[in-house]
Amino acid sequence: QLQLQESGPGLVKPSETLSLTCTVSGGSISSSSYYWGWIRQPPGKGLEWIGSIYSSGSTYSNPSLKSRVTVSVDTSKNQFSLKLSSVTAADTAVYYCARHGPGATFDPWGQGTLVTVSS
Amino acid sequence: SYVLTQPPSVSVAPGQAARITCGGNNIGSKSVHWYQQKPGQAPVLVVYDDSDRPSGIPERFSGSNSGNTATLTISRVEAGDEADYYCQVWDSTSDHVVFGGGTKLTVL
């Protein structure tokens, strides 16, 4: 079955760019009608959608983060990526990747990766 | 922007029914999805499109959506249902995903 796995640095310095990759296995990221998204969860808090990319390359992002977010896809590697610029301690969170359809049903999810912003 | 409001906590005795609400302006016109998240784990989809269940989710989990409130109902609650539950929609007017703040379900 489809599986997603996040990877990237667990520690990022303030003002730098957070970069994460989600590797998709058990299916093609080029499949039509699916979006590939990023969600985060600060410690002890709720879920926050960051952004999504459609298989065609169209992107959508949370307006509160939009100016700092870049979501991209690499079909040759069956991966999609997140870049979040100018990070602060408030960006410390567990970051999840997930697939969703047009109705934004997120399933499945990756296991999540903790990213800490600290000098 | 669209806002979803959930009660911070709900408590229920084992064997009883738990109802978790999700409020939003005319939410009945949107498709609502529900996720269960246990400590240290990724969220799991338990109800989608208001009332459908993914394969493998017990029939005890059901959903409804009308007017300004969507509801997740867990019948015959078990200790293993203790978790955080989140509602979520796609706001088509702005092409944004919105999550509710989450509800902690405690089984007494």
Image: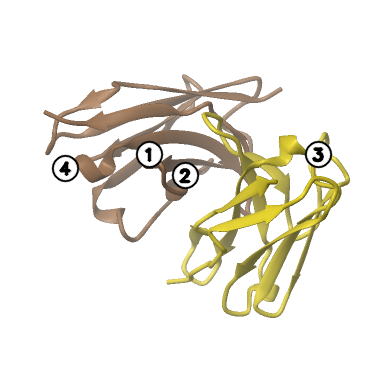
Chain holding disc 2:
A
Q: Which mark is residue A53?
A: 2
The image's mark for residue A86 is 4
Q: Position of residue A98 (x, y in %)?
A: 54, 36
* Marking on residue A43: 1
Describe residue B59's horizontal placement relative to residue B64 as left or right. right
Amino acid under disc 4 = Ser
| Residue type at tag 1 | Pro
Q: Comparing marks 1 and 3, which lies closer to the viewer? A: 1
* Element class at badge 2: strand
Q: CA distance from mark 2 to mark 4?
A: 21 Å
Distance CA(mark 4)–CA(mark 1): 20 Å
- The local secondary structure at tag 3 comes to loop
- Name the spot of residue A18 as percent of width and height, x first: 25, 33
What amino acid is found at the position of numbered circle 2 in the picture? Ile
Q: What chain is colored yellow?
A: B
Q: Chain of mark 4?
A: A
